[in-house]
Every structure is written in structure tokens, then in C-alpha cells.
Image (spheres, rainbow, N blue to C red):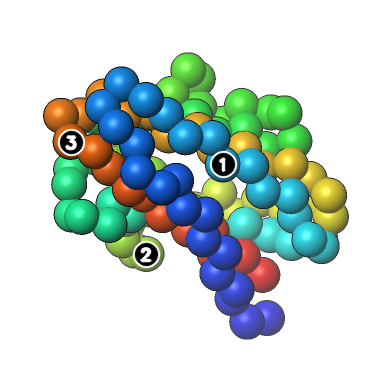
Amino acid sequence: MASIFKSLNTGDIATGNYSEQPWVAPRDLTIKKMLIVERNGYSLDNVQVFISIDDVPYTKDFVPASVIGSDTEYCWKPNLPIKQGTRIYVKVQNSSGNTINCDIVFEYE
């Protein structure tokens, strides 16, 4: 089966603020990979990410965004099947010294 990519953009997040990005699965699918990419090339070491899928938290309480990864080889690979209508929720909180703008990218089949 061919991979499909879905991107959610946080918009600009100033230091001390956050962006919440929900997504509802359009069909039954399997999330193969998740990446976070900062558009300006800023480090994601001091950016926290909260992830829940179908109200099940996958981060307790959070992880640095750099742990999720921004490279398709070195990123979170949950290989998680989900049903149509499942709510995926990602919150990105900026504790860095720069305004950031992140793309949250899902690769799924």
C-alpha cells in the first residue's frame, strides 16, 4: 500500500505559548511515522509535545519535540492502526527563546 502524508501546521508560536492541532482520521488507517519539522531551522530541544490518540496519551506528560524527530529514518514510528473518526491531538508548547513554526507530519497507509 502506498504511503500518504498529512501535515498539520502550528502557525507561529511565541515563547511561552502553545498550539493545539487536532486531526480526525478520514478512514481506517495505520500511522507509520510522525515527524516534527521547524520551518526556520530552530532547535526543538526546548519545545514540548503532547500526543493523544483516541484520548489515550502517548506522552506522559510530554516529550521534547526533538525526540519525535524530523528525519524519516530517525522519527517516531508507532505503526498504529486506528479507525475512521479517531481523534488525534497534538499540542506543541514553545519554551525556547525564539518564535517557532512547526509542521507535524504523519505518514500513514
Is residue 25 visible to the viewer in this orientation of the structure?
yes
Indicate left or right for 40 with 8 as reference: left
Question: In the rendered image, which quarter contains the C terminus?
Answer: bottom right
**Mark 1 closeness class: few <14, some 14–19, many ≥20 residues within 10 Å:** some
- Alpha carbon separation for disc pair 2 and 3: 25 Å
Going from N to C along the chain, the mark reached first, 1 or 3, is 1
Which residue in the protein does label 1 denote? 21
Amino acid type at circle 3 is Asn
Residue 98, disc: 3
| Residue bearing mark 2 | 72
Residue 71, horizontal then vertical, whole percent: 31, 61
For this rendering, which residue is in front, 78 or 53? Answer: 53
Residue 7 picture location, percent across and down: 51, 61
Closer to the camera: disc 2 or disc 3? 3
- CA gap, disc 2 to disc 1? 21 Å
In-image side of 94 versus 106 (left or right): left
Please rate how many residues cluster around mark 2, counting C-alpha atoms within 10 Å: few if below 14, some from 14 to 19, many from 20. Answer: few
Most extreme residue toward the bottom, as rendered? 2
**Secondary structure under the numbered disc 1 in the rendered image:** strand
Q: Which one is in front, 96 or 62? A: 96
Quadrant of res 2? bottom right
- Amino acid bearing label 2: Thr
Quadrant of residue 87 within the rendered picture: top right
Which of the two discs, 2 and 3, labels the residue nearer the N terminus? 2
Q: Secondary structure at mark 2?
A: loop
Dot 2 or dot 1: first in sequence order is: 1
With respect to residue 5, does 2 lie above or below? below
